[in-house]
Amino acid sequence: MKIAILNGSPHKANTSAMVDAFLQGAQEAGHEVEVLHVGKMKIAGCLGCEYCHTKGNGQCIQKDDMEKVMPAYLDAEMIVYASPIFYSGITAQLSAAAQRVYAIGKPAKATKAALLLSSATKSYGGAVATYQNMINYMGLEDKGIITAVGDENGSEDKLNEIRNFAKNI
């Protein structure tokens, strides 16, 4: 299975450790995985201009790093969203990338999704709600949500949990 991981973290820390663990487990299971570091890319939010649906044939009028993300997104059979928690939600960078998929409506091949969240406290309700609403809109099957809270971040037990989760999707 082809998996695209959208890492919304703007820095290399706990979320990146979760992404690396998922990558290891998925590759060990024989999946083809591409990690897209959208947290470090320049991706503007959706303008709601409808160019993509009226003149653009699914192409956004904005020319930025989303052009690097879209090929993997279109080809993936599973999308994994990963983010640290900023004020109870996913990062603005991941949100912008997720919103820009509006140009195509839903991923062409994807049928599954998962969410990896890293936080200092259990204040991730907004991020989970955003994810659930998004995948419901796109008709994707939720394969699971894994959170690392406080001391769980970077712990070998949590990273092993993520590796095993990825091996068994």
Image (tube, grey):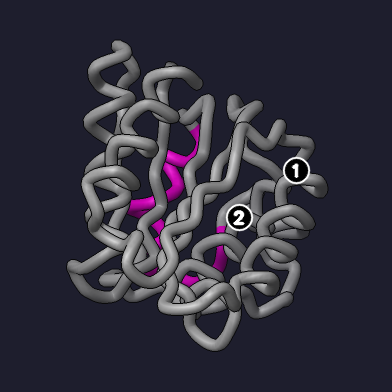
Inspect the image, locate mark 2, and give the three-letter code of the amino acid beneath it.
Val
Q: Estimate how packed mark 2 is, as few (under 14), some (14 to 19) or many (20 or more) residues with alpha carbons within 10 Å.
A: many
160 horizontally vs 135: left or right = left
Identify the residue at horizontal 26%, vertical 40% (top origin): 21
Of all residues shown, which one is farthest toward the top?
30
Q: Main secondary structure of the magenta part?
A: helix
Q: Which residue is mark 2?
A: 101
Query: Which of the 4 quarters of the picture holds residue 161?
Result: top left
Q: Which residue is mark 1?
A: 138
What residue span does the magenta drawing correspond to?
Answer: 60-74
Of all residues shown, which one is farthest toward the bottom?
87
What percent of the width, then of the height, locates residue 151? 32, 67
Q: Is the C-beta separation of discs 1 and 2 under 8 Å?
A: yes
Q: Examine the rendered structure and indicate whether residue 115 appears above or below residue 141.
A: below
Query: Which of the 4 quarters of the picture holds residue 17?
Result: bottom left
- Cα separation between marks 1 and 2: 10 Å
Q: Describe the element under mark 2 as helix, strand or loop.
A: helix
Q: 30 or 109, which lies in front?
A: 30
The quadrant of the picture occupied by the N terminus is top left
Does the segment drawn in magenta span residue 68? yes
Q: Describe the element under mark 1 as helix, strand or loop.
A: helix
Q: Earlier in the sequence, mark 1 or mark 2?
A: 2
Q: 81 or 61, which lies in front?
A: 81
Identify the residue at horizontal 39%, vertical 51% (top origin): 69
